[in-house]
Amino acid sequence: MQTTSPSNVGAPAWWYDRTARALALQAALLFAVVAASVFFFSNVQTNMAARGLTLGFGFLDRAAGIPIGESLIPYTPSNSYARALLAGLLNTLRVAVFGCLLVTLLGVFLGVLRLSENPLLSGLVGAYIEIVRNTPVVLQLVFWLVVFQQLPSVREALNPLPGVYLSQRGLKIPVLEWNDAAAYALVGLALGIAAAVWTMRRARAHQMQTGEYRRVWPICLGYLVLLPLAAAQLTGDRLVLSVPELQGFNFAGGAELSPEFAALLTGLVIYTAAFVAEIVRSGIQSVGKGQWEASRALGLSNGRIMRLVILPQALRVIVPPLTSQYLNLTKNSSLAIVIGYQDLFSVSNTSINQTGQAIEVIFIMMTVYLVLSLLTAAGMNVYNTRVALKER
């Protein structure tokens, strides 16, 4: 005989249908979300109207009047708030892109050294990791800003490499002047990268089929060097290298990296690399010792074992937490406001103070950081899928 649960006594007939019950609960949840949104929107409109403000993005077309010390695009305070926010976004992207690249290189290097058989070297790296990971990142950013501000004056700038100068005003480096030759060279570089990738894939496929190893890095290097130079020659123009030169009280020519940008990039890279080093260490240790023994039995050196055998297998453990560190670095770049670097968060904060359009500006910030995080996670997930071990 069929019995009814006491909790369902008196319930309508459709309630016993799992699908109908799920749809009803989802409809109720949707109604609650819509009702809360309508209440929030109405409350915001009422409070903004009481202060003489209107909800909308029309303010983006008004002149910003925000001075931005460094920008990747032409910008003056007479430009609109939209252009000011774009300049701040590009500054954020500059920190995020270069930061992720440098963190990867430094983190992998330190992670490998952490497993060194030399106790002094391993101990130094371990001390660095523990000190950096347990120190607030804001404190580290302020520390590096003070370090860069204590550098020599422009006339006594450090010259570690030809054409490279380090002073209180930042880092000056040589840079190619933008002309037709540089544009064609950039296209040639893209073709060289594509050719190098194709060559490496062909060599890998050949090795998988025959077991024969082909040394292709000289060919790939030739693609990356010769194709841009050949493309630049097609314009009849020539590549011009702008080298910094001291003229009066400042340098002329070249590209300048401000002390604020250098401090932010250095602080975030050193802080995040400590976490990445531990991720790499754990990934390497997840590979069985038998892999080392088998590789040494084949006569491979430790360097080639690490590069060709251990790290490729360790990537399945390294990539997921490494993605989180990339996201953390991108979001931590908003701390630039502490040391005066004008990124998206800094420009947005000034825009809120000047316009009072806090909700709109915060919505723009949330959307931008969300999109950056989703794009980073999606790209790393694609790469993680490619390096994951697959059962055959």
Image (cartoon, helix red, strand yellow):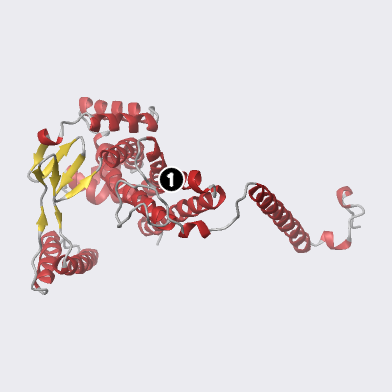
Residue 115 in the image, given as x and y percentages of width and height: 27, 34
Q: Residue 205: name its quadrant.
A: bottom left
Q: Quadrant of residue 281?
A: top left
Can residue 340 be seen in the rendering of this structure? yes
Image coordinates of residue 73 in percent, x first then y, are 30, 57
Question: Camera-side residue: 130 or 136?
Answer: 136
Say which quadrant the C terminus sits in.
bottom left
> The residue under label 1 is which amino acid type?
Phe
Question: Residue 246, located in which quarter of the rendered image?
Answer: top left
- Given residues 44 and 193, the one toward you in this image is 44
In the displayed structure image, the side of residue 36 where residue 338 appears, left or right: left
Residue in the image at 54% along x and 53% along y: 360
Query: Above or below — where is 181 with respect to 295?
Result: below
Horizontal side of 371 relative to 129 (left or right) equals right
| Number of other residues with Cα within 10 Å of mark 1, as a class: few under 14, some 14 to 19, many 20 or more | many
The residue identified by callout 1 is 345
**Percent position of residue 45, x then y:** 66, 52
Tell me the SS state at disc 1.
Answer: helix
> Is 168 left or right of 128, judged from the image as shown?
left
